[in-house]
Amino acid sequence: MGWLSNRWSRVRSELTLQDLLLDVGGKTLVALGLGALFASVLQPYAWALIGGGLVCSTIVKAKYWKRFWA
């Protein structure tokens, strides 16, 4: 993952909040589209997927909590 860290260091100064929000919005639309396509297949796993997403988000927030709020 060192290459990812190096790439982030290069683009960090050029990346704007609007770009980041547009990227996240696009990924959200893709996820919603895939969810609509596979809704009947994934329905039994919906709560597990939601829980997994919340756990991932919580892990990242906990990792960077002090850096953002210090």
Image (tube, rainbow, N blue to C red):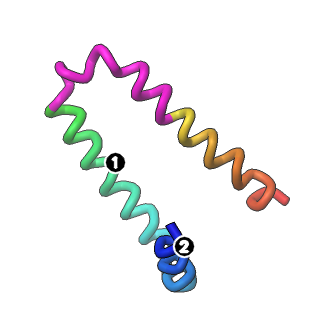
Q: Nearer the viewer, residue 68 or 48?
A: 48
Q: Position of residue 24 (x, y in %)?
A: 40, 57
Residues shaded magenta: 38-53
In the figure, is residue 35 to the left or right of 28? left
Near mark 1 (Cα within 10 A), the count class, few <14, some 14-19 or many ≥20, is few
Residue at position x 54%, y 73% from top?
5
Q: Position of residue 2 (x, y in %)?
A: 53, 72
- Mark 1 and mark 2: Cα distance apart in space: 23 Å
In the figure, is residue 67 to the left or right of 21? right
Dot 1 or dot 2: first in sequence order is 2
Q: Position of residue 39 (x, y in %)?
A: 20, 25
| Callout 1: SS | helix
Looking at the rendered structure, the kind of residue marked 2 is Ser
Instruction: List the residue tagged with mark 1.
Output: 28
Query: CB of mark 1 within 8 Å of CB of mark 2?
Result: no
Residue at position x 44%, y 61% from top?
21
Give the quadrant of the C terminus.
Answer: bottom right
Mark number displayed over residue 5: 2
Residue at position x 40%, y 28% from top?
49
Looking at the rendered structure, the kind of residue marked 1 is Thr
